Amino acid sequence: MSRKRVAVLISGRGSNMAALIDAAKDRNFPAEIALVLSNRPDAGGLATANAAGIATAVVDHTQFGKDRAAFECALQAVLVEHRIDIVCLAGFMRLLTADFVKQWPEQLINIHPALLPAFKGLDTHRRALDAKATIHGATVHFVVAEMDAGPIIAQGAVAVRADDSESTLGQRVLAVEHRLYPLALKLVAEGRVSVVDGRCLIDGVPVPDAASLVPSA
Ligand code: GAR
């Protein structure tokens, strides 16, 4: 089976992007990273992608003012030009409208640094600490028009320690993200994930243990 062509959309340092690039170096991985696309020309991840020999593009949202439709039209044009099959948001800090999302049914995925549906939005690690959560983590999900609300493909948990700071907790969650995103992309690229009633099935059954990571540390 030919490998799916994946675009990774970033806004910043791109450590999740780098984890996907690393995973896709394995010829048996069912997807290749065909494009890294940023909405910010200064995103650190662009240099990492270039160094890895991956095509990069920038669609600078500031050039479009308040015209979100024109920005998304430009994004879509680049994705089509590169014959992209699956889009992975990896720290892409722009909300996408329903019109954009509907062009990528079950082919647009995002990673969020919390165990959804808890802690949607920003500052998830600080909010988990403030809430005295004992378990925190990361979620990979299909993107729908509502923010951080789409069907969950895979989740990874970390225990919250009594002496955790936002930074120490964030580092452990990020390490889980780097394992989780390649796992979730593999499942999607292999065509093993379907959505029924807003819930992901893998190989036709509810998300099994294999899609959940509970690291021992
Ligand atoms: C990651 O923690 C990702 O989960 C988060 O931004 C970080 C990007 O880091 N995404 C969101 O908060 C999306 N709402 P990275 O650029 O090193 O991958």
Image (cartoon, rainbow, N blue to C red):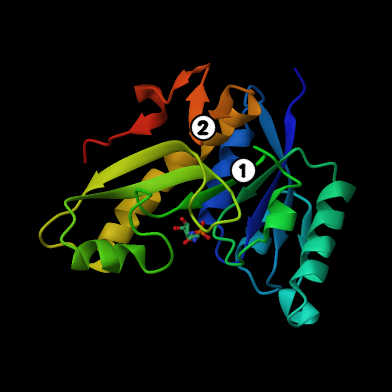
Quadrant of the frame with the C terminus: top left
CA–CA distance in space, label 1 to label 2: 32 Å
Q: Check disc 2 and report the residue beneath it.
A: 197
Instruction: Give the secondary structure at mark 2.
Output: loop
- Give 211 or 204, whichever is nearer the viewer: 204
Tell which residue pokes out farthest to the front in this image: 197
Which residue occupies 79% across, 60% down?
A: 75
In this view, the residue farthest toward the left is 162
Total residue callouts: 2
Query: Where in the figure is residue 130, as x and y percent of width and height?
Result: 20, 68
The image shows residue 5, relative to residue 26, as above or below, that is below
Left or right, 192 with reference to 107: left
Whether residue 50 appears in this view of the structure is no
Of the two numbered discs 1 and 2 in the rendering, the one whose residue sits closer to the viewer: 2
Mark 1: secondary structure: helix
Q: Pick the quarter of the image with the N terminus.
A: top right
The furthest residue to the right? 81
Residue at the spot 38% in from the left edge and 49% down from the top edge: 116
Q: Residue 66, image x and y in percent?
A: 73, 81
Which image quarter: residue 69? bottom right
From this viewpoint, is residue 149 visible? Answer: yes
Q: Residues within 10 Å of mark 1 (few under 14, many from 20)?
A: many
* Type of amino acid at the residue the image marks with label 2: Asp
Q: Which numbered disc flags the more N-terminal residue, 1 or 2?
A: 1
Image position of 58 with respect to 195: above or below: below
Instruction: Find residue 157 and report its image quarter.
Output: top left
Res 3 → quadrant: top right
Which residue is rendered at x = 19% and y = 56% of the image?
A: 133
Q: Which residue is mark 1?
A: 21
